[in-house]
Image (spheres, grey):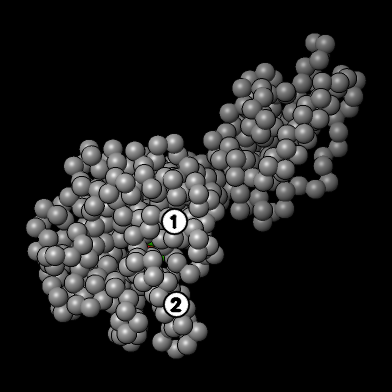
Amino acid sequence: MMTSLDCLFLPPGTVLFSEGDAGDHAYLIRSGEIEIVVERDGRELVLARRSANEIIGEMALLDRGTRSASARVVQAAEVVAFTKRQLEQRIADTDPILRMCLGVVIERYRDTLKIVRPNASPPAPPARRVPGQAFDAAVAVLTLEREIEHALARGEFELFLQPIVSMGDRSLAGFEALIRWNHPVRGLVPPSQFIPVAESSGLVVQITTWMLREAARAILILLAEGCSGHKAGKEPLFISVNVSGHDLLLPGFAESVMEILREAKVPPRHFKLEITESMLMKDPVGAGQILDACRNYGMGIAVDDFGTGYSSLSHLSTLPITTLKIDRCFVQAMVADPTSRKIVNTIRLLARELEIPVVAEGIESEAEAAALEAIGCEYGQGYLFGRPMPLRDAIDFLRSASPRQTPPRLVAVA
Ligand code: C2E
Ligand code: CA
Ligand code: CA
């Protein structure tokens, strides 16, 4: 996971930062030794020494103050840097009480530094360092974040599309946009290996913007193909894009999506936004206002992974939802498990009451498809109909798709 790109190798004597500097970075020390130094009354005083599995320079990042001491390498050191931006999103996500305590602790520590006297001797190293596992996990996460940023800059991501079909005649209704990472070393990386870190760091916002642009470009190409396999008289062919709770918090999110569609000359009715039930229910009122704006522009709104969160029924009826996507776990269990079948049936009845069509996710077998059809599910998505595929294969899929025809065998992805 670690690459030389993410590590700084510092020879003895290197001044990592100086007292009074703006604090832009903190550092995880992988090896070597770094001392923390202040100058008082013209004399230099070593306050502490930090070595492997410790952090240095975090204070200025946490309270946005200037450096209250300098850091100088004593023994050749290998460090991993992390930035203010990487930390700020996490602090913003933190419980406010915890955030307040953090502020108080830092303030007190800075006060202590002010009264440090030159004749004091350097304190003994702390008894407890960051436990190895937690330290390695932090290094892995920070490294992955850097890699995601580089991947965005170097164009290593790719849009894949998975068909969504009408259950009745298996005709193509649209596609879900799913991201893939063409990693130069690791090959095709699935989203489960990087989206959670992109979420926690806030980088997901840049990913969403990239996906929205790619999806807008793709739907235009698919529509230009003449929708040959798309049944006339049905809802317009669409692409649905996954968005995160972070995206909805961006000021003017609906307008910026609309801007992307306008630039690409894509009518919004060919576009859907997918948001998971759990993210939606974190702030249904706030999310509702933003999704209302998207809906008013003409985009569709799908609730993803439905059944895994805790939806309040009163909110469901007021949100501008145009599709409910039943989570794969219920679909795949329903053939063997009567409880899952009852859950799917209940969701279907609820959706019918709300006049919202349902997409069943993760359909792999004809038995599952038959059970879902019997319940009256309108749409399906799953390996039975087609795996996620690059745009060029989606174009072939669209060309060959026709009612009651078995979809062609598609490329398998990791
Ligand atoms: P999701 O939004 O629920 O997407 C459906 C996932 O189920 C996809 O996994 C798809 O490949 C998989 N799937 C579809 N049919 C079947 C099936 O028949 N059997 C099985 N076993 N799996 C099936 P994928 O592409 O690995 O994506 C995983 C998750 O990563 C997505 O779940 C979504 O939460 C996230 N994700 C993917 N692309 C993006 C993106 O562009 N932005 C964001 N924010 N999240 C994304
Ligand atoms: Ca989805
Ligand atoms: Ca889903």
Who is closer to the viewer here, 408 or 244?
A: 244
Who is closer to the viewer here, 166 or 131?
A: 166
Percent across and percent down for residue 137 are 61, 53
Residue carrying label 2: 346
Q: Is residue 70 visible?
A: yes
Is 358 placed above or below 288 here? below
Residue carrying label 1: 318
Who is closer to the viewer here, 130 or 45?
A: 130
Q: Is residue 209 visible?
A: no
| N-term-proximal mark, 2 vs 1 | 1
- The residue drawn where x is 45% and y is 67% is 306
Apparent side of residue 88 relative to residue 68 in the rendered image (left or right): left
Q: How many angstroms separate mark 2 from mark 1 (CA)?
A: 19 Å
Image quadrant containing the C terminus? bottom left
Q: Residues within 10 Å of mark 2 (few under 14, many from 20)?
A: few
- The residue drawn where x is 51% and y is 41% is 6
Q: Quadrant of residue 322?
A: bottom left
Mark 2, secondary structure of its residue? helix
Percent across and percent down for residue 13 are 66, 25
Percent across and percent down for residue 332 are 42, 79
Whether label 1 lies within 8 Å of ligand 2 gets the answer no
Is 207 placed above or below 58 here? below
Q: Quadrant of residue 327?
A: bottom left
- Look at label 2 and name its amino acid: Thr
Q: Quadrant of residue 122?
A: top right
- The residue drawn where x is 34% and y is 69% is 358
- Look at label 1 and name its amino acid: Thr
The label nearer to you, 2 versus 1, is: 1
